[in-house]
Image (cartoon, helix red, strand yellow):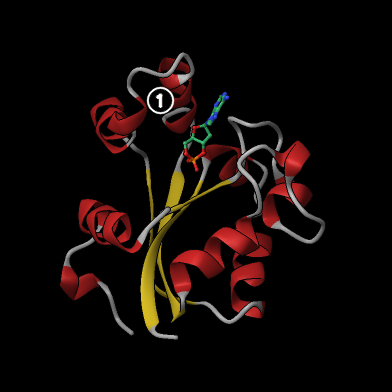
Amino acid sequence: MSIERTLSILKPDATRRNITGKIITKFEENGLRVVAQKRIRLTKAQAEAFYEVHKERPFYASLVESMIAAPVVVQVLEGENAVAKNREIMGATNPAAADEGTIRKEFAESVEANSVHGSDSLENAEKEIAFFFAQTEIVG
Ligand code: CMP
């Protein structure tokens, strides 16, 4: 077990419905700490760059549009095995497949508007954290 940091995004469907606090409570109740956080409006270029890995997917253009439709809250979460732990707390990408008690089961509207994003590996977590945060903005 080791203390890790992971990148979390509360997506436009969550800010629009004013449920960011309910989602953050799930992280905190499950042992993750918010060590950096800001509410921003992604530009189209930022959304495209962030999801570049999905560029060839049929849902890419729609995903980018959905991510710029309203503000997002970007966060760094810290805790024991934070990358895997966060993915457990979020639940499956498709809310129809998500376990009871997970964020996506409880709050997601659809596979695209699925309320949260979380890094899928420690390596990507480092890249995604650096995409949004300067080291000085992360206070553990
Ligand atoms: P996220 O964890 O942010 O990573 C990629 C995102 O693409 C995913 O959450 C969903 O928002 C979106 N996504 C993944 N699969 C699909 C799909 N089949 N249709 C639409 N959007 C999808």
The residue lying at 46 percent from left, 13 percent from top is 58
- Quarter holding residue 36: bottom left
Total labels drawn: 1
For badge 1, the amino acid type reads: Val
Depicted 7 relative to depicted 36: above or below: above
Residue 25, position as x, y percentages in the image: 65, 71
Give the quadrant of the C terminus: bottom left
| Residue that appears at 72% across and 40% down | 95
Q: Which quarter of the rendering shows the N terminus?
A: bottom left
The structure residue drawn at horizontal position 35% and vertical position 17%, both measured from the top left corner, is 56
Answer above or below: position of 24 versus 95.
below
- Is residue 133 among the parts visible in the rendering? yes
Residue at 28% from the left image edge and 53% from the top image edge: 128
Judging by the rendered image, the residue that carries numbered circle 1 is 64
Q: Is residue 136 above or below residue 50?
A: below
Question: Is residue 41 toward the left or the right of residue 93 in the image?
Answer: left
- In-front residue for pair 80/37: 80
Crowding at mark 1 (Cα within 10 Å: few <14, some 14-19, many 20+): many
Helix, strand or loop at disc 1?
helix
Residue farthest to the right, as pictured: 100
Measured from the top left, where is residue 67 in percent x and y? 45, 32
Q: Nearer the viewer, residue 17 or 106?
A: 106
Based on the displayed image, in which of its 4 quarters is residue 60 positioned? top left
Front one among 63 and 81: 81
Classify mark 1 as within 8 Å of ligand 1 or not, answering yes or no.
no
* Horizontal side of residue 1 vs 112, given as left or right: left
Q: Is residue 43 visible?
A: no
